[in-house]
Each structure stands twice: as C-alpha cells, then as structure tokens.
Amino acid sequence: MERENVWKSYDEAAIQELNRVNEGYKAFITTAKTERKCVRETIRLAEKAGYRDLDQVIEKGETLKTGDCVYAQIMGKAIALFKIGARPLTEGMNILGAHIDSPRIDIKQNPLYEDAEMAFLDTHYYGGIKKYQWVTLPLAIHGVIVKKDGTVVDVEIGEKEDDPVVGITDLLPHLAADQMGKKASAIIEGEDLNILVGSQPLKGEEKDAVKAQILTFLKDTYDVEEEDFLSAELEVVPAGKARDYGFDRSMVMGYGQDDRVCAYTSLAALLETGDLQYTGVCLLVDKEEIGSVGATGMASHFFENVVAELLDRLGIYSGLNVRRALKNSRMLSSDVSAAFDPIYPAVMEKKNAAYFGKGLTFNKFTGSRGKSGSNDANPEYMAKIRRIMDENHVAFQTAELGKVDQGGGGTIAYLSAKYGMQVIDSGVPVLSMHAPWEICSKADIFEAKKGYEAFLREA
Ligand code: MN
Ligand code: MN
C-alpha cells in the first residue's frame, strides 16, 4: 500500500509540463484573491478558450449542441462552466467541483474609527482562522464599494509594487507577559483584528482629523463617502504574490490555496480537454468556509437551475430530465487535504494521511466524530476512480483528515450527493492550511490537473 514519490517518475517533458501548469496556477491565485476575482479571472480564461455566457445564449434565443462551451455565474461569486458532450445530458455529467472562497478578514459595515490619532477599520473574520497568524503581516484590501446609484467601485490596495500595505499590530514581547499566558485562541481576540490604515491628521480639522484624512483619500481615490461602507464588500488578505517555495522550487506558497488549488486545476482541466463523451462541468462555488450557505454557496439551487436552462437550450427540458441529468452525474468534489507535517505527526495516522509528492488525494469520507457530516463515497465508485487514475498514469493517494476524533472537516460533497449522483472527495494536500500563506507541492498540483482531465474524458 506504500505509494512512490511521483517526482522520481518524471522525465524532462513531464517537468516542463508540470512547470507550465504551476506557472498558470501561480498567476491565477496571485490575481484571484477573492471569490469575485476568481469568477472574473475564470470568465477571462474561459472566453479566451471559446466559452460563451449562457445568459446571452438564452437572450438571443440560440440553441446548444455537442461541442458547445458555455458558462453561467451568479452574483459574480460562483460559476459553472459546461463543455457539451456527445451523450445526452440526461445520461449525466462529469463534474469537477471546488470552492473559491478562502479564510480572510472582512471589513465591517460601519468600520472606520479613530483612536489615539490613528485610523482603523474594524473587521469580522471569515472562516476558520488562527487569529494570531494574521497580525504583523503586510495585508491588502480587495473588494467593491457599491454606491447608492448602483455604481460598483473596485477597490484594491496593497498589491502593486508601490502600493501602501495595511495590517494588524501586535503587542511587543516586553509588555506581553499577560498576553503570552493566555490560550492561543485568546491571544488575539476577534474584536481586536483592527486594520491600521492611517496616522496623519488632516490640516484644519479639529475632531477625528486622522479619520477625516482617510475619508478625503477615499473621496479622492474612489469617489465614495463614509456611508458607502454600508454597501461594501471589502476583504483583507495577505499582500503579495504566490511564489516558488524551497531551494528546489518544488512547492508553491500562496494565499487562498484552500481551495483555489483545486478550483484552478479543475478549470484548467476542463478548458484544455478535447471533445467529450459526457458533458464536462467545472463548478466553482462560494461560502464553503462558512457552511456553503447563501445564494452563491453549494446549498443554493444555482447549479440545478443552470442545468435546467441548459436542458432547455438543448431542446430537452423537463422537470424529470433535470433530475435525471443530476442523478446520473459523477462528481469529483475537490477540496484540499491536510498534508502530513512531520513536525506535527501526533495528529495524523500515517497510513491514512496525505503526503506531498504522492499525487491527487481521494477521501472516501471526511467529517468528524464518527464521520459526522461526511459524504461517504460508494466503493463501486471509488473502484472506477482507481481504474481511471491507473489507466491514465495519474499518481493518487487516499487519506482522511487526521486521526479519528482529532478534529475533522466537511466539504461540498454531501450537497451534490443529495441528487443521488456519484460523488467523492478529492484534492491536493496543503501544509499550513487556513494560514495566511499556505504551501502545496507542484507535483500534486500537476497530478491533480492530470487526474481531473482523465476523469472528464473517461468517467
Ligand atoms: Mn476547503
Ligand atoms: Mn477550508
């Protein structure tokens, strides 16, 4: 049951292809640091590959046929891409699913305040973070401010070489005796994740002059007022690019690899694949980190509705056909696995852990405390997946998230499984998951992309 390190099997051509995939990936996660930007970048890449907006197809009253490629998005935060296969849609689709939201720090609706002649933005973090990891880092702000007249103003501060960055301060060790005695979960309190954004008073201003200076900046730069924060969605993320990691450049360090590493490799697999028997799908959803809720999360009817529209464009819409198309589908629900970290072996069970360099990871089940919350994939389906991976020379491994009763986690798998389709959790192992900078192995990223393509062609 031991699996070889896949690096040993690569020839020169494989290394070249591995590097090509990883350069594309690094560029993607450097640009796409929010779910909105993921959708935007996905549309850009998809249109370059000949995909059309399904809404426009509908609007023009056009029909679809085998070989056509379309995408549909919702609220700019979730997207589904389809490459129509030769077989009828009612025979099911081969679906690659992943989530594009990542843990981060969101700006509150009434955020701006001044204290001790310093200006701060108050925040509410998003997803499961170790709060102490997010202080004293260069941070960037990405998002939108929507004005009352409907104008959407794009905000991005902290990414360009000459941009300023922002951040969260921490106490000096000299005065931290009390703080250091606290539990790690309380060292930095959620309400204390305040972003320092200014310290220069506006001349001629009596009260809150530093805050006034920040408001002047916002007015000059974005033409927005303080009240416009009420209808803003601003996300604070680590500033800077994804980079090669290690002397040997065998890894990628970047923000938001959970789960954009699976999102990008799924997308690249679909965009680069040739003609398909079964309709190929890449489904990238929002809100997984907070329970897949909301209109843009996997629990919404977004995907089902789009499948209905698709059947309509194919001229075979009926309520029953929607159910058949979904029920007969096969899905790889992709999300990152916890990579085995030899510094923390105690939380892992070595035979059933994911390792760097051993390829695409399949989790028959996830969940916690007796598999609670898990989609436990059928062994018949797992057998088929093994066959596809082996026949296509894709390195894969199987794992679960840590030791029994050590913790655990869920994914979007159980939500698509509701339709009765075949679903299994798969993905790329990551070190320092949910930290500001996460690490993946370039070999696993490459094998994931290969595995997804094989799945689209053969499942
Ligand atoms: Mn995830
Ligand atoms: Mn996560």
Image (spheres, helix red, strand yellow):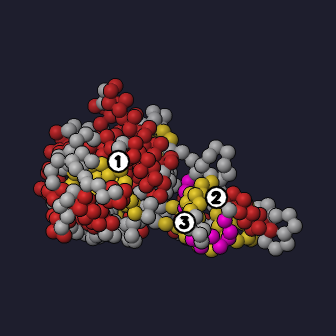
CB of mark 3 near ligand 2 (< 8 Å): no
Q: Disc 3 marks which residue?
A: 233
Q: Nearer the viewer, mark 3 or mark 2?
A: 3
The CA distance from mark 1 to mark 3 is 28 Å
Residue under numbered circle 2: 167
Mark 1 or 2 closer to N-term? 1
Neighbourhood count class around disc 1 (C-alpha, 10 Å): few under 14, some 14–19, many 20 upward: some
Which range of residues does the magenta coloring cover? Answer: 224-238
Residue under numbered circle 1: 51
- Residue 296 picture quarter: bottom left
Classify 101 as above or below 239.
below
The residue type indicated by label 1 comes to Tyr
Neighbourhood count class around disc 3 (C-alpha, 10 Å): few under 14, some 14–19, many 20 upward: some
> CA gap, disc 3 to disc 2?
18 Å
| Left or right: 108 in relation to 409 | right
Q: Are marks 1 and 2 in contact (CB under 8 Å)?
A: no
- Quarter of the figure with the N terminus: top left
> Can I make out residue 182 in this image?
no
Q: Quick one: which residue is furthest to the right in this view?
A: 204
Indicate whether residue 249 is drawn in magenta.
Answer: no
Label 1 vs label 2: CA separation?
A: 39 Å
Of callouts 3 and 2, the N-terminal one: 2
Amino acid on which the number 2 mark rests in the picture:
Gly
Nearer the camera: disc 1 or disc 2: 1
Is residue 412 among what the camera can see? yes
